[in-house]
Amino acid sequence: MAPQKIKEISDKGFEVIDLTCLDVKKVQQKAVQLAQEDFLVLILGKPEHPEVIAIKANADMFSDNVYVIQDIESLKDITDKIKEHKRVGVVIQTTQKLELLESVVNYIIPIASELKVFNTICKSTSMRQSEARELAKTSDLMIVVGSKKSANTSHLAEILTSITNTIHIETASDLVQYKDLIEKSTNIGVTAGASTPENIIKNVIEELNKM
């Protein structure tokens, strides 16, 4: 949550209990550190995501040079600012893909004189993506289970699509839409987003067994 919003709530007499994930809090702290050290700060992630909004709000308190980058195209838009500032710091939304961080760093290296990078992708997210990649290599169909509004779940589906046939569903009832594809598949792998409840995953597997 943005510091201004926390202050607004406190000023109204409410007690604020900060339950922010420690991994997310770490990104906020690193972004603030970079801003205080006069780096041009790049936050890699989706601009509309609450985590990214809060990271930027924290860093904005210490610098006017804070930008959210969701892809290489948006990075190209501030190339002149990077060249002018010369010192660039990077943090990344905890649920983003490692590929985004790698592509941004590779783009910046030739045009910045100093680059400080914090890989703030959540360890469980990185591990989940890595394990899902390996599973996809031996599957002719991957099923990703979880909310389509979940960043880490959607990124899982994006990653696996480049490896094998992949479908993204929210519940077992969605499987009927892909009945033909499922019946034609020999090896089916199932993975899920970090926030997907265990019972939903279990229901999906039970329904697959029936099909």
Image (tube, rainbow, N blue to C red):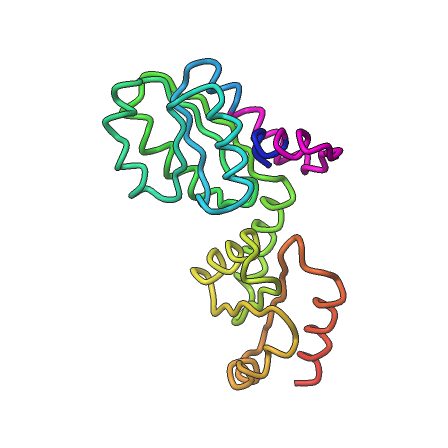
- In front of the other: 7 or 53: 7
Chief SS of the magenta region: helix
* Residue in the image at 53% along x and 27% along y: 58
8 drawn magenta: yes
* Residue 52, image x, y percentages: 51, 39
Q: How many marks?
A: 0
Furthest residue in direction front, as rendered: 12
105 drawn magenta: no
- In front of the other: 146 or 127: 146
Q: Quadrant of residue 150?
A: bottom right
Q: In which quadrant will I find the C terminus?
A: bottom right
Q: In which quadrant will I find the N terminus?
A: top right
* Residue 4, image x, y percentages: 56, 30
* Residue in the image at 48% along x and 32% along y: 56
Q: Quadrant of residue 110?
A: top left
Vertical order, 126 against 108 (above or below): below
Segment tinted magenta in the rendering: 7-31
- In front of the other: 2 or 11: 11
* Residue 109, image x, y percentages: 33, 26
- In front of the other: 103 or 131: 103
Vertical order, 153 against 9 (above or below): below
* Residue in the image at 54% along x and 67% along y: 168
Furthest residue in direction top, as rendered: 37
